[in-house]
Image (cartoon, rainbow, N blue to C red):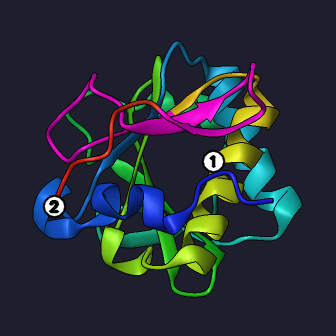
Amino acid sequence: MADLLWDDVRCFFDPDLMGSLPDLRVPDASVEDWQAVLDLVEAKGWKCQYSEGEAVLPVPRAESVLSRPTDAECPNLRVWPAAEVLAIFRFLDVEVIDFDVDLRELQGQERLDVFCGFLREIGRRLGKPVLMDPQGGYERPVLGFYVEADRVVLLAEPLVT
């Protein structure tokens, strides 16, 4: 059974209403949590690409990425949990696992199911919530994986369009 139904949440996936790049986050994270995400990507065999600026490099240990000087270029990890579905992790802060998705890639029930499955995998591995905020609407999650529910749930009332 699907965590969410497309007809119930389509407004949260409308790039014109929400911005095309919502903010996804795992709060209260640690270096160990970041490493668990890197290990999950490898264990699941998801296609990925790590880069620092324009340089594409092998995926390092989380500890080395997160200990880079603050004025260094922000490294990112592109992860494709499915073809044509991309998540971009940005190593901005040890305490928040931060990543983006493009809502234009998440249209329809099939893609929503892939997205929810991706959030579930991360949340279960970490035992922590994975929250989605509207682009620029940090700290106002509209949906997310909740450990207690063991699924992705709505956290805001759908917008009337």
Range drawn in magenta: 131-154
Tell me where residue 120 appears, x and y as whole percent.
Answer: 72, 45
Q: Is residue 36 left or right of residue 65?
A: right
Residue 60 visible, this orientation: no
**Image quadrant assignment for residue 4:** bottom right
Q: Is residue 94 left or right of residue 103?
A: right
Real-space Cα separation, disc 1 to disc 2, in angstroms: 26 Å
Residue type at mark 2 is Thr
SS assignment at label 1: helix
Quadrant of the image containing the N terminus: bottom right
Tell me where residue 43 appears, x and y as whole percent.
Answer: 88, 58
Residue 151 is inside the magenta segment? yes
User: Residue reaching furthest top?
Assistant: 28
Q: Is residue 127 left or right of residue 67?
A: right
The mark found on residue 119 in the picture is: 1
Foreground residue among 67 and 132: 132
Residue 144, compared with residue 53, is above or below; it is above
Tell me where residue 3 appears, x and y as whole percent.
Answer: 68, 51
- Are the residues at dot 1 and dot 2 in contact (C-beta closer than 8 Å)? no
Residue at 74 percent of width and 27 percent of height? 149
Residue 71, compared with residue 134, is above or below; it is above
Tell me where residue 60 appears, x and y as whole percent.
Answer: 64, 49
**Image quadrant assignment for residue 153:** top right
SS assignment at label 2: loop
Q: Is residue 96 left or right of residue 45?
A: left
Residue type at mark 1 is Leu
Residue at 42 percent of width and 78 percent of height? 107
Number of other residues with Cα within 10 Å of mark 2, as a class: few under 14, some 14 to 19, many 20 or more? few
Residue where numbered disc 2 is placed: 161
Q: Which comes before the other along the chain, label 1 or label 2?
A: 1
